[in-house]
Image (tube, helix red, strand yellow):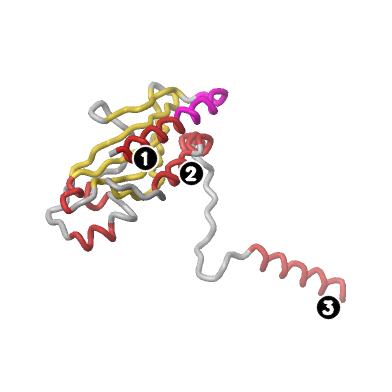
Amino acid sequence: MSADKKARRYADIQRRIAKRRPFGSGPQEEKPLKPADRVLDLLNAFDALAELAQRSYNSILCYGPKALHGPAWSGVVIWYHSRGYHGYQTLNLLGVWAHYQQGRITISIGIRKLPYRAPVYDPGVYRVAIQNNFRLYYEDDGLPPADRDRLLYRAPFELKKRLTHRQALSEILERWRRDIEAG
């Protein structure tokens, strides 16, 4: 094998090694973002809700955020319930959803109340499990707000009004934080 051929082969091996993922990780899947996911990214919804979930509140326990997806919608939610032994009975989802309504992507910000649905309540198991997911105990997929839910904002998404939507999200979350901290 000539020196030139060896050098090309060596460079090819180095390039393949550089492209490999770390040991133990699955194959990298880069799916294109759905339009609803892209809208939530443009609004910085995940980071805005993450900031709220990381705070400590006197009257509630707050978890999340979590990105949720359905066939025609995407959302980012945090979930919270009142402190105390019976606080688990009602869970609140505060979220931002991008969903299709009359053929257009619509942004909805709202609060959904979910009743506890599991047959028994074990506080130790619940306390650990609720930190990562709410679906097990509340049997809900995190759908966008319906008529019975508390809608805080709804508007058709327009790219040129992105900053207006983002400002509305920021103001709503700030108002929610103040209300929770006031008790």
> Which mark lies nearer to you, 2 or 3?
2
Q: Using the image, determine if residue 174 lies above or below residue 56.
A: above
The residue sitting at 52% across, 61% down in the picture is 27
Q: CB of mark 1 within 8 Å of CB of mark 3? A: no
Mark carried by residue 47? 2
* Chief SS of the magenta region: helix
Q: Quadrant of residue 71?
A: top left
Across and down, in percent, residue 14 comes to 72, 69
Q: Is residue 161 magenta?
A: yes
Circle 3: residue type: Met
Depth check, mark 1 against mark 2: the one in front is: 2
Quadrant into which the C terminus falls: top left
**In the rendered structure, which amino acid carries the disc numbered 2?**
Asp
Q: Which residues are magenta?
A: 158-168
The type of residue carrying mark 1 is Gly
Q: Nearer the viewer, residue 179 or 76?
A: 179
Question: Marks 1 and 2, Cα distance to the nearest angstrom?
Answer: 21 Å
Earlier residue among tags 1 and 2: 2
Looking at the picture, how far across and down is residue 171, in whole percent? 44, 30
Q: Quick one: which residue is furthest to the bottom in this view?
A: 1
Please report the residue visible at 24 percent of the width from the left and 53 percent of the height from the top: 136
**Residue 1 circle label:** 3
Label 1 secondary element = strand
Q: Earlier in the sequence, mark 1 or mark 3?
A: 3
Q: Which mark is residue 36?
A: none
Q: Earlier in the sequence, mark 2 or mark 3?
A: 3
State how many labels appear: 3
Residue under numbered circle 1: 70
How busy is the neighbourhood of tag 2: few (under 14 within 10 Å), some, or many (20 plus)?
A: few
**Residue 179 drawn at (x, y percent):** 33, 35
